[in-house]
Image (cartoon, coloured by chain):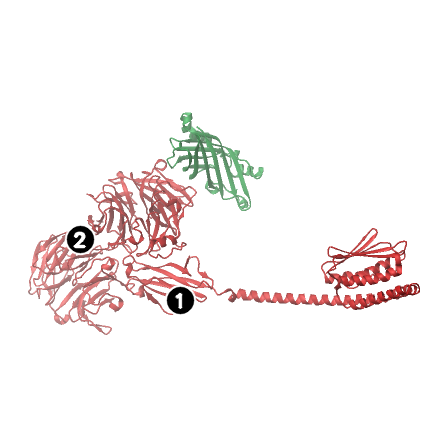
Chain colours: A red, B green
């Protein structure tokens, strides 16, 4: 029995156990649940609603772990989705980092009574029982309730539930077993198993199912009952139960039922014998109240005591001490009685008692039951053979003589027609009825006087294990010997046995084990992970596994997989010193090994039992952050520091587990380690597969494997889409640039053309003969009247022409430059028209650029198109307004307008369109003509 | 006749008791809401009738289907009554049963309880557990509940063509004040 102390975990007391398909053990303790790998507890915290309550049931359904609480709360966690940090061993740290259970929120609400158990009907229904509100089933997102008042449940206080493969759910109540079912959605049926059905105690407090689909119920007073579920009746019960309430049950195959009791610890009921065996282990328990029992994939029994202590026991193996020592021969007869031969006489086992058949003076080395008449043949060392009736009376004694060449009989075997006696003086075959010699000692044929083992197989062959001359077979009255296999000599053969498939297995004194399949041999040695090459006994078990005895333990060999488990104290199995050929397989397939001080039984599990650790990936961290590795398998290039935590779930002996791992894509070889983690910093982009194997003894050839594949993506600048996108962007940008440049060049070209045209027009207009003619006429008048004014006039004229020549090459000039040019120009006009022309300049803001000669052109236009006279003076105003320079004149059109090209204003407008967003605005309102030129 | 029998069975236990041992309500509010991809439809009625018998922890609620109003259009109401709920054939919807928890109705303040019973809509009975709040305020019982009703549960066939307009699950909310 193994205990799991929780001193490092604040002495938590467990209250519920659940074994999950993933191999983990989940435990409820306080309000939290814990994932257990055999060594460490990884917590998952309770939801807020259950902080002050206690977990009363844990269950796995549809990939979720369900925790039911005393206060009726039910909460779930998806272990595959939750990133449960690898436990550090420090409970406070682990609790702080732990994820939380999420409250389960069906629309119908949660019970207000303690949740006592869960089960599933295998048809999409999650069932749970409560102590106070009966049974609930969750089906197709709808919660249904079965209770006493509405549905006829035995009682609303349900202690436990269990389901059978037919979809029915069996509830343990104070009024017998209530059988609930939902044959179709929303349709309820409730049946009852009570006194009329053979239940002698209706107060049922525990319930479970076995592999045949039958239901086992534990009662408050009268022990345990088996309900045949197809007949709907109790078909097995144990009389005289005196151990009080049965709080829990665990059924192992069809062999034994383990009962947890309220006051008397663990009790094992042997179904074959109907015996209650107070489990030897229960003495080790700290208290005799058992609160929970469960069994796992390895065939271990798990339990919780009333004080919340967790324990497990490898119940398939048990040793019973005998009141005599040196067991050398074992045999169970047809009626199931067991005969045990020892150095201290022959005994008949009766329950846990032994009655002595042959006195202490007889050293018993072999026992055989005649299949014909049931007489037991007992071979002694030195005193011949005793023939004993099934009742235990000595019928006859064969002494050394014609039929028996020597008084020491090491082995007896035979058929209805002949009994082979292997003695230290050779082998003789006699008729079991007449006791007449059929075939005498034939040392020639056997090649040796010493035969350790004679074995009559199922195909009418007789095998002799000799000392020095290997293995000899008698088939069709011909002897054939095997003294060498594949170049390895076989000298001494100690044991011979036959497996289920008819293969012959034999062991040697120091060269290991052989299997003969009729045509060839297969040898097993320590190289195949046998514990030793010195084998003392052989037998085969009901599972097809070969039991190999040694002087210090035994191996279980699975011939199909070549997998070997060595069984000793580390596996929770009593130590065994197996005597020579002291191995026996009984009718149920249990293997019995005779040891120095007792009988060791390896019980036939009766159902598949795992014999390997189960490798699982416990967690993946990237840069120390746990990630949900079942959902994420693609990582960016900079998420490349991986740590893998794994576990080899092997509760039989968790300390013995070794790992072998390999990251395909980077590791050329396997790495073998005791550590349950592996780190890979700075993995380059690529696709990887992590492969993990776990083994309990370092033989990875047969070890199961778990793997996980993931990808680290290359950085974005090395992905095809990025490269393609970049090329596309570059080509688009280049195209745009080329087009923009073309447009700009076009614009510049047209601007240039416009400018040339406008300069040409301006020049044309300025050297317009009219202007010059008018100017000269004005000048002539002035020279005569006022020579000083004439000089001034010529100065202005020269100024105007100089500026005009100066500015016309430029695209833009400053506003003040243009204004001074206009001033000069207007001066000329004022002198010519005197009071007929008036220029008003009201420019506050002198900043800004303007096209040269534009204002001058507007003034000239005004003169050209309007009447200018002293009686009707023409006024031109120039002022700034919102970023525009405005030229406005009063409108007094000439009746015969001068023919013009209208080139000036149009050219100005077009040039401004090329230079600026703002257009040149022309307005003609009553009495005024206005042109607005944007300032640049 | 059938309907008359049903109603009398529903109310018989209540009627047999003296008037002031049960809580009653004649004008409870009930709201239906269908949230579909293309349309949200709401309907309501203030004519929900109910009794709660505190000693037996039992209850009965009923509503006349034709009293529902507030649809998006009169045509919708007509479809509701004629095509879906068939209110001439099945004039009433009801919910009868017992409360799972032991409830102290005298206790002031709000309690959350679960009502387990038979929900009958469109002549199809479904067993349901409905979570509701009961509040005793000055001797009056305020009952509130919200739950969903899958239309398929009650054999209400929605033509494929209006699937986008009518939700598969109708959200129902109930608010009622019961007095002795």
| Left or right for B89, reference A45 | right
Number of numbered discs on residues: 2
Q: Give the mark nearest the N terminus, 1 or 2.
A: 2
Query: Relative to the observer, which residue lies in front, A448 or A869?
Result: A869
Give the number of the mark in front: 1 or 2: 1
Residue A708 point in image, percent of width and height: 40, 61
Query: Relative to the observer, which residue lies in front, A99 or A332?
Result: A99
| Left or right for A809, reference A587 | right
Badges 1 and 2, same chain = yes
Q: Where does label 1 land, which residue? A: A664
Report which quarter residue A580 is drawn in: bottom left
Residue pictured at 17% horizontal, 57% vertical? A599
Q: Where does label 2 land, which residue? A: A336
Residue A400 point in image, percent of width and height: 6, 64
Question: Which chain does the numbered disc 1 sit on?
Answer: A
Q: CA distance from mark 1 to mark 2?
A: 55 Å
Residue A631 point in image, percent of width and height: 43, 57
Badge 2 local density, few (<14 within 10 Å), some, or many (20+)? some
Furthest residue toward top: B18
Report which quarter residue B78 is drawn in: top right
User: Looking at the image, is A133 positioned above or below residue A647?
Assistant: above
Badge 1 local density, few (<14 within 10 Å), some, or many (20+)? some
């Amino acid at each position: 029995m193994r205990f799991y102390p929780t001193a490092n975990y604040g002495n938590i007391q467990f209250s519920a156990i659940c074994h999950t398909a993933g191999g983990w053990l989940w435990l409820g303790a306080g309000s939290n649940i814990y994932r257990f790998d055999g060594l460490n507890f990884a917590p998952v915290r309770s939801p807020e609603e259950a902080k002050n309550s206690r977990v009363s049931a844990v269950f796995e359904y549809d990939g979720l772990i369900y925790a039911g609480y005393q206060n009726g709360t039910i909460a779930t966690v998806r272990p595959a989705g939750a990133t449960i940090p690898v436990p550090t061993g420090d409970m406070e740290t682990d609790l702080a980092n732990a994820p939380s259970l999420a409250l389960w929120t069906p629309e119908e609400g949660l019970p207000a009574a303690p949740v006592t158990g869960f089960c599933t009907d295998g048809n999409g229904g999650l069932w749970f029982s409560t102590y106070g509100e009966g049974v609930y089933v969750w089906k197709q997102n709808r919660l249904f309730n079965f209770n006493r008042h509405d549905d006829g449940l035995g009682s609303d206080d349900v202690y436990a539930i269990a389901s059978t493969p037919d979809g029915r759910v069996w509830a343990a109540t104070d009024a017998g077993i209530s059988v609930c079912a939902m044959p179709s959605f929303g349709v309820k049926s409730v049946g009852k198993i009570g006194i009329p059905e053979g239940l002698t105690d209706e107060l049922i407090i525990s319930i479970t199912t076995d592999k045949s689909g039958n239901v086992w119920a534990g009662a408050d007073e009268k022990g345990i009952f088996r309900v045949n579920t197809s007949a709907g009746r109790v078909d097995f019960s144990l009389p005289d139960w005196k151990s009080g309430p049965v709080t829990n049950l665990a059924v192992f195959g069809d062999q034994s039922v383990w009962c947890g009791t309220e006051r008397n610890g663990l009790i094992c009921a042997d179904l074959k014998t109907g015996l209650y065996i107070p489990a030897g282990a229960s003495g080790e328990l700290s208290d005799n109240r058992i609160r929970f029992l469960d069994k796992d994939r390895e065939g271990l029994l798990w339990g919780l005591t009333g004080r919340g202590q967790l324990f497990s026991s490898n119940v398939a193996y048990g040793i019973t001490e005998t009141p005599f020592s040196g067991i050398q021969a074992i045999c169970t007869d047809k009626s199931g009685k067991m005969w045990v031969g020892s150095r201290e006489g022959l005994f008949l086992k009766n329950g846990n008692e032994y009655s002595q058949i042959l006195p202490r003076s007889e050293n018993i080395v072999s026992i055989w039951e005649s299949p014909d008449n049931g007489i037991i043949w007992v071979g002694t060392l030195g005193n011949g053979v005793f023939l004993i009736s099934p009742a235990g009376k000595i019928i006859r004694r064969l002494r050394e003589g014609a039929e028996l060449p020597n008084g020491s009989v090491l082995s007896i075997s035979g058929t209805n027609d002949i009994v082979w006696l292997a003695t230290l003086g050779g082998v003789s075959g006699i008729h079991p009825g007449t006791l007449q010699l059929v075939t005498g000692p034939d040392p020639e044929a056997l090649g040796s006087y010493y035969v350790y083992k004679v074995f009559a197989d199922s195909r009418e062959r007789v095998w002799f294990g000799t000392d020095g001359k290997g293995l000899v077979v008698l088939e069709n009255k011909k002897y054939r010997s095997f003294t060498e296999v594949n170049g390895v000599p076989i000298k001494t053969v100690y044991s011979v046995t036959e497996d289920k498939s008819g293969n012959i297995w034999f062991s040697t004194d120091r060269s290991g084990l052989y299997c003969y399949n009729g045509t060839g041999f297969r040898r097993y040695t320590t190289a195949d992970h046998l514990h030793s090459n010195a084998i003392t006994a052989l037998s085969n078990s009901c599972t097809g596994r070969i039991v190999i005895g040694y002087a210090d333990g035994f191996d279980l060999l699975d011939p199909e997989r070549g997998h070997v488990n060595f069984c000793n104290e580390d596996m929770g199995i009593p130590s065994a010193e197996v005597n020579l050929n002291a191995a026996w397989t009984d009718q149920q397939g249990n293997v019995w090994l005779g040891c120095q001080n007792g009988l060791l039984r390896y019980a036939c599990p009766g159902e598949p039992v795992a014999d390997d650790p189960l490798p699982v990936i416990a967690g993946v961290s990237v840069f120390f952050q746990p990630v949900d590795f079942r959902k994420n398998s693609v990582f960016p290039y900079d998420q490349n520091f991986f740590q893998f935590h794994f576990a080899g779930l092997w509760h039989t002996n968790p300390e013995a587990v070794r790992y072998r791992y390999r990251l395909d894509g980077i590791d050329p070889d396997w790495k073998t380690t005791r550590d349950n983690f592996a780190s890979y910093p700075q993995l380059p982009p690529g696709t990887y597969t992590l492969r993990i194997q776990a083994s309990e003894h370092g033989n990875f050839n047969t070890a199961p494997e778990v793997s996980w594949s993931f990808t680290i993506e290359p950085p974005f600048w090395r992905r095809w889409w990025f490269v393609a996108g970049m090329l596309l962007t570059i080509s688009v940008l280049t195209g745009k640039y080329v087009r923009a440049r073309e447009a700009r060049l076009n614009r510049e070209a047209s601007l240039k053309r416009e400018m040339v045209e406008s300069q040409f027009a301006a020049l044309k207009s300025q050297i317009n003969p009219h202007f010059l003619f008018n100017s000269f006429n004005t000048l002539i008048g002035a020279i005569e009247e006022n020579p000083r004014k004439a000089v001034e006039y010529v100065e202005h004229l020269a100024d105007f022409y100089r500026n005009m020549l100066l500015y016309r090459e430029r695209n833009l000039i400053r506003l003040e430059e243009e204004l001074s040019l206009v001033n000069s120009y207007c001066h000329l006009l004022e002198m010519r028209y005197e009071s007929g022309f008036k220029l008003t300049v009201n420019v506050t803001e002198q900043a800004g650029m303007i096209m040269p000669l534009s204002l001058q052109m507007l003034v000239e236009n005004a003169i050209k198109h309007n009447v200018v006279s002293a009686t009707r003076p023409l006024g031109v105003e120039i002022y700034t307004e919102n970023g525009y320079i405005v030229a406005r004149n009063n409108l007094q059109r000439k009746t015969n307008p001068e023919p013009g090209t209208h080139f000036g204003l149009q050219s100005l407008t077009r040039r401004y369109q090329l230079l600026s967003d703002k257009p040149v605005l022309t307005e003609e309102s009553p009495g005024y003509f206005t042109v607005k030129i944007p300032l640049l | 006749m059938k309907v008359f029998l049903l109603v009398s069975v529903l109310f018989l236990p209540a009627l047999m008791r003296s008037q002031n041992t049960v809580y009653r309500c004649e004008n409870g509010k009930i709201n239906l809401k269908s949230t579909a991809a293309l349309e949200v439809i709401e309907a309501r009625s203030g004519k929900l009738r109910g009794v709660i018998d505190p000693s037996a922890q039992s209850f009965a609620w009923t509503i006349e289907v034709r009293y529902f109003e507030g649809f998006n259009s009169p045509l919708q109401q007509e479809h509701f009554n004629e095509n879906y709920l068939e209110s001439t054939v099945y004039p009433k919807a009801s919910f009868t049963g017992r409360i799972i928890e032991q409830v102290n109705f005298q206790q002031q303040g709000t309690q959350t309880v679960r009502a387990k019973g038979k929900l009958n809509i469109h002549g199809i009975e479904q067993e349901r557990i409905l979570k509701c709040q009961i509040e005793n305020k000055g001797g009056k019982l305020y009952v509130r509940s919200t739950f969903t009703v899958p239309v398929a549960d009650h054999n209400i066939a929605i033509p494929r063509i209006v699937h986008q307009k009518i939700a598969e699950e109708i959200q129902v909310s109930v608010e009622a004040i019961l007095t002795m």
